[in-house]
Image: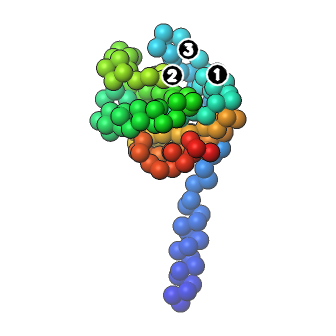
């Protein structure tokens, strides 16, 4: 009996495991994001700019305490992996707050805003964004090789950047 229960629990656990995507969905790629210069792009257009390079995506907001506390760790990664593109995606709904946050924290990298915020839109839905900061790593082909890290000091980030 215990063996049957164990097998059932294992099957339930395995069926609940989400498959980690290797590519962004079409809807996520078509999401509109804005540059610091207020120019709109699809997320796919942004990704196309970095083809051939490894990319660390940092999903953050200026109001997010954990995001701000993670910035020094991201800056350490930038020193250790200077060849990587650091793509900051803000979920700030107030553009002024986002831009001030970039300046205040001296964030070096590529910056875009997801104007619908953390709860709405196809990109945040694809990411199943329930917590920020959120870190993803893309390989040189633009494939997602790390989908979900919430701490910039997570060893999985460094491992993905070394691949």
The residue shown at (48%, 36%) is 80
User: On residue 49, which mark appears?
Assistant: 1
State which quarter of the image contains the C terminus: top right
The residue shown at (70%, 35%) is 141
Dot 3: what SS?
Answer: strand
- Where residue 85 appears, as percent x and y from the top left, is 55, 28
Distance of label 1 from label 2 (alpha carbons): 10 Å
Q: Is residue 63 visible?
A: yes
Q: Nearer the viewer, residue 115 or 102?
A: 102
Q: Nearer the viewer, residue 48 or 19?
A: 48
Q: Is residue 67 left or right of residue 59?
A: left
State if disc 2 and disc 1 touch (CB < 8 Å). Answer: yes
Residue density around tag 3, few if under 14, some if 14–19, many if 20 or more, within 10 Å: some
The residue shown at (55%, 48%) is 159
The residue shown at (31%, 37%) is 69
Residue assigned mark 3: 40
Residue density around tag 2, few if under 14, some if 14–19, many if 20 or more, within 10 Å: some
User: On residue 135, which mark appears?
Assistant: none
Residue assigned mark 2: 110
Residue 30, picture quadrant = top right
N-terminal of the pair, mark 1 or mark 3, is 3
- Where residue 64 appears, as percent x and y from the top left, is 32, 33
Name the residue at the bottom extreme. 1
- Where residue 101 appears, as percent x and y from the top left, is 34, 21
N-terminal of the pair, mark 1 or mark 2, is 1
Residue 51, picture quadrant = top right
Distance of label 3 from label 2 (alpha carbons): 14 Å
Relative to 93, does residue 156 appear above or below in the rendering? below
């Amino acid at each position: 009996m215990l063996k049957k229960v164990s097998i059932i629990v294992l099957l339930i656990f395995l069926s609940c495991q989400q498959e980690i995507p290797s590519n962004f969905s079409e809807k996520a790629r078509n999401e509109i994001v804005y540059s610091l210069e207020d120019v709109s792009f699809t997320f796919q257009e942004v990704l196309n700019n970095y083809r051939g390079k490894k990319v660390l995506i940092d999903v953050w907001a200026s109001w997010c305490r954990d995001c701000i506390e993670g910035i020094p760790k991201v800056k350490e990664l930038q020193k250790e992996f200077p060849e990587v593109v650091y793509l900051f995606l803000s979920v700030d709904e107030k553009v002024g707050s986002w831009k001030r946050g970039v300046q205040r924290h001296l964030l070096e990298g590529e910056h875009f805003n997801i104007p619908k915020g953390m709860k709405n839109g196809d990109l945040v839905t694809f990411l199943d964004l329930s917590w920020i900061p959120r870190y993803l790593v893309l390989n040189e082909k633009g494939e997602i090789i790390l989908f979900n890290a919430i701490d910039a000091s997570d060893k999985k980030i460094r491992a993905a950047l070394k691949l």
